[in-house]
Amino acid sequence: MLLIYPGSFDPVTTGHIDIARRASKFADGIIVAVLENPNKQTLFTAAERVALLKEAFAEDTKIKVESSDGLLAEFAKQKKADAIVRGLRTSEDFERENKYAAGNAALSSVETIFLPATPALTYVSSSIICEAAVHIYKNNLDDSFIAQLVPPSARAALRDKFSE
Ligand code: ADP
């Protein structure tokens, strides 16, 4: 079974890594797909996000990283994926994801599998990490909060981005 795990990954977090690794236990392969959305402002370019993910998954032989600037449903079809996988943290995630799942099923008959967030990681999001990182690195504060929530490559990239 081949799964596509799509997202912005701006940047990759321990929450993302957790979902991909748990999914890789029952799949033969996972393609982590960095979606390039020109209407969405991101902190890191798609190439940077791909590089950070590749470093994070360097030891995971079943997990590959790619980027896509097209429709997810098309990408999934092109890759002959069996399903899309998404992580759910909250009921808001579910409301939004359920609509996308229905849209992707209608567009190209692709199924979506939801994995619940690991309870201790439900608060982890790229946006919360970026907000904290601006403050921490601009003021040269202890960054152990960031170190717990992103892999070392993303921690260094955030430090470079925000240090003055
Ligand atoms: P997008 O920008 O596409 O909304 P993200 O890049 O933030 O998505 O996340 C990609 C996927 O990972 C989504 O399915 C999201 O719900 C899931 N995800 C993000 N953070 C976590 C977490 N802490 N635990 C579980 N799933 C998560």
Image (tube, helix red, strand yellow):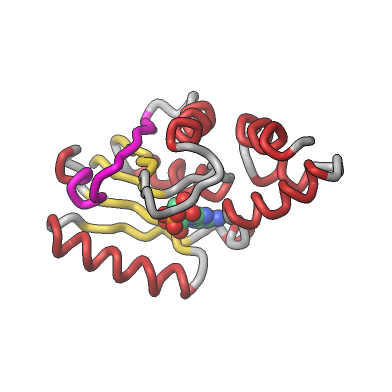
Q: Nearer the viewer, residue 157 or 110?
A: 157
Q: Quadrant of the N terminus?
A: top left
Q: How many marks?
A: 0
Q: Identify the magenta region.
A: 62-76
Residue 113 picture location, percent across and down: 31, 58
* Residue 129 forms part of the magenta stretch: no
In the displayed structure, would residue 137 be above or below residue 123?
above
Q: Is residue 24 left or right of residue 16?
A: left
Residue at the spot 46% in from the left edge and 61% down from the top edge: 116
Residue 134 picture location, percent across and down: 73, 48
Q: Nearer the viewer, residue 55 or 43?
A: 43
Q: Is residue 60 left or right of residue 149?
A: left
Residue at the spot 45% in from the left edge and 68% down from the top edge: 93
Residue 51 picture location, percent across and down: 48, 28
Q: Is residue 18 left or right of residue 148?
A: left
Q: Quadrant of the C terminus?
A: top right
Residue at the spot 36% in from the left edge and 45% down from the top edge: 35
Residue at the spot 49% in from the left edge and 25% down from the top edge: 59
In the displayed structure, would residue 152 be above or below residue 116?
above
**Quadrant in the picture for residue 123:** bottom right
* Residue 67 forms part of the magenta stretch: yes
Residue 29 picture location, percent across and down: 31, 35
